[in-house]
Image: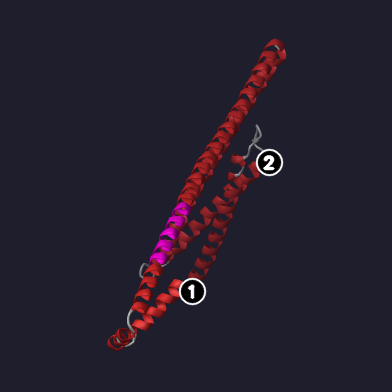
């Protein structure tokens, strides 16, 4: 008995889940009707078909839940599964939520249709008034033309403002480039001074070398030889270096 009950429970639950999936798909398609840009003034066949299908599926789900409830209550209390009770509660909650969702979407579609009909009636009244009053229609036409001209002027003003902003940006960039060029010129102006300083240092070194060479050659040979021995041969090296600098 328990095995047949469990098998029947699984089949009924599978049917319930399948109907819940179908309900979700139908709700998605039905909700698109209220978001259309041109809602018909009266319910269409497609709309009535969606509503009929949703009502039929909700009714079938309610019957399945009643069968699941009878199966669960027919089981002994000792063998009743907490998971089955939880699944049954979930199916009931989804059914109640989908029933409320159908009412909500139906109301939303009706409200959108009423608003569309109201706007259509207003447009019809305006057209009828213009047709019966040519002068008023002409005045409305002139007002519309004036509004379009003002809108075009606004577009031109925006374009000019953008152009002025771009021109100002170019001016800032020119100032930045001019500042960079000034700094480069100042740095280039300082380089000749550095070169002159280096040249004066080299000239002084060459002059000192010439003086040192002249002094060395003016010494007596015995003093030059003693200096060579006392300085370990460093003086001739310095003299040669000085001579090289003086030749340069």
Residue at the spot x=64%, y=24% of the render? 148
Q: How many numbered discs? A: 2
**Residue 153 seen in this snapshot:** yes
Residue 232 at x, y = what percent?
A: 31, 88
Residue topped by disc 2: 45
Residue topped by disc 1: 3
Residue at the spot x=41%, y=80% of the render? 240
The image shows residue 5, relative to residue 113, as above or below, that is below
- Residue in the foreground of this view, choosing between 169 and 14: 169
Tell me, yes or no, whether the highlighted magenta stretch contains residue 6. Answer: no
- Residue in the foreground of this view, choosing between 74 and 60: 60
Left/right placement of residue 4 relative to residue 236 reads right
Helix, strand or loop for the magenta stretch, by majority: helix
Residue 20 at x, y = what percent?
A: 54, 56
Q: CA distance from mark 2 to mark 1?
A: 46 Å
**Residue 125 seen in this snapshot:** no
> Which image quarter: residue 51?
top right
- Residue in the foreground of this view, choosing between 56 and 237: 237
Tell me, yes or no, whether the highlighted magenta stretch contains residue 198. Answer: yes
Q: Residues within 10 Å of mark 1 (few under 14, many from 20)?
A: few
| Magenta stretch bounds | 187-204
Q: Secondary structure at mark 2?
A: helix
């Amino acid at each position: 008995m328990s095995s047949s009950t469990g098998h029947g429970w699984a089949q009924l639950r599978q049917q319930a889940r399948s109907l819940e999936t179908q309900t979700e798909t139908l709700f998605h398609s039905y909700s698109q009707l209220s978001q259309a840009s041109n809602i018909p003034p009266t319910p269409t066949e497609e709309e009535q078909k969606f509503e009929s299908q949703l009502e039929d599926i909700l009714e079938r789900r309610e019957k399945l839940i009643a069968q699941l409830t009878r199966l669960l209550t027919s089981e002994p209390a000792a063998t009743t599964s907490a998971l089955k009770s939880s699944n049954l509660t979930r199916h009931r909650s989804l059914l109640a939520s989908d029933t409320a969702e159908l009412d909500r979407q139906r109301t939303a579609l009706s409200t959108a249709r009423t608003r569309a009909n109201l706007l259509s009636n207003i447009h019809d009244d305006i057209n009828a008034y213009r047709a019966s009053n040519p002068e008023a229609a002409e005045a409305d036409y002139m007002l519309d033309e004036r509004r379009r001209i003002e809108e075009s002027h606004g577009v031109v003003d925006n374009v000019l403002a953008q152009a002025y902003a771009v021109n100002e940006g170019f001016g800032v960039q020119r100032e930045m480039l001019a500042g960079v060029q000034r700094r480069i010129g100042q740095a280039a102006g300082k380089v000749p001074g550095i070169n002159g300083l280096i040249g004066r240092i080299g000239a002084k070194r060459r002059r000192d070398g010439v003086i040192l060479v002249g002094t060395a050659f003016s010494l007596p040979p015995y003093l030059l030889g003693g200096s060579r021995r006392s300085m370990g041969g460093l003086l001739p090296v310095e003299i040669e270096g000085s001579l090289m600098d003086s030749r340069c």
